[in-house]
Image (cartoon, grey):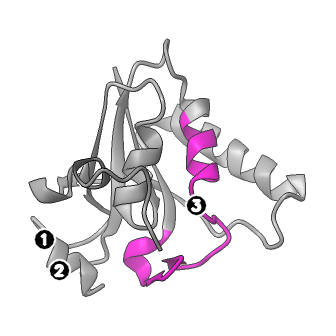
Amino acid sequence: MATATFGAGCFWGVEAAFRELDIIDAAVGYMGGTTENPTYENVCRDDTGHVEVVQVEFNPTVTGYDKLLEKFWSCHNPTQHNRQGPDHGSQYRSVIFFQDVNQREAAEGSKKALDESGQLPQPVATKIEAASTFWRAEEYHQRYLEKRGQAHCRI
């Protein structure tokens, strides 16, 4: 089993996107900030430094990290800085939190390839940072869209 963590805007839709893959589990939460035990309200005020993230548990022999990266790039606009759709603030920034050197190298290579592909109208704004403490979000956020019978966020 391995772990990967991604920030790509509102975590509800990102979680649903990763659940389309053959993974062990996905949980929404917060990473990258300075406050211990942040709450959704703290993070939404954009004063803790945390990002809304999805932490994915996966079996690399079933679904490789490269497949997770493909899903990450396809489920949001990686050219936007501190926003996704109607959501604004650093808590919605595009970021890959790597767990080890292999993930870092794969993420950097994937980002470079996407940037050089000419597919996007602007440069990729996604940050690649070392993973820190994952704070699991409140239970009512877990599988939020699934609980409401939605396949994706409605904007």
**Tag 2: amino acid:** Asn
| Quarter of the figure with residue 2 | top left
Q: Amino acid at mark 1?
A: Thr
Q: Is residue 2 left or right of residue 101?
A: left
| Circles 3, 2 touching at the beta carbon (< 8 Å) | no
Q: Position of residue 105 (x, y in %)?
A: 62, 39
Kindly identify which residue carries mark 1: 39
Which is more N-terminal, label 3 or label 1? Answer: 1
Q: Amino acid at mark 3?
A: His
At x 13%, y 58%, the residue is 140
Q: CA distance from mark 1 to mark 3?
A: 24 Å
Distance Cα–Cα, label 3 vs label 2: 23 Å
Residues shaded magenta: 68-93
Which quadrant holds the N terminus? top left
Say which residue label 3 marks: 76
Q: Secondary structure at mark 2?
A: helix
Q: Is residue 13 visible?
A: yes
Would you say residue 24 sits in the magenta stretch? no
For marks 3 and 2 on the same chain, the one whose residue lies earlier in the sequence: 2
Q: Is residue 111 shown left or right of residue 128?
A: right
- Residue ID at (68%, 70%): 79
* Secondary element at tag 1: loop
- Kindly report the distance in space between the C-alpha atoms of the residues bearing marks 2 and 1: 5 Å
- Would residue 123 appear left or right of 78 to someone viewing this image? right
Residue 108 circle label = none
Dot 2, crowdedness within 10 Å: few (<14), some or many (≥20)? some
User: Do the numbered discs 2 and 1 sit on residues whose CB atoms are within 8 Å?
Assistant: yes
User: Residue 80 lies in magenta, yes or no?
Assistant: yes
> Which residue bears the numbered disc 2?
42
Residue 130 in sight in this render: no
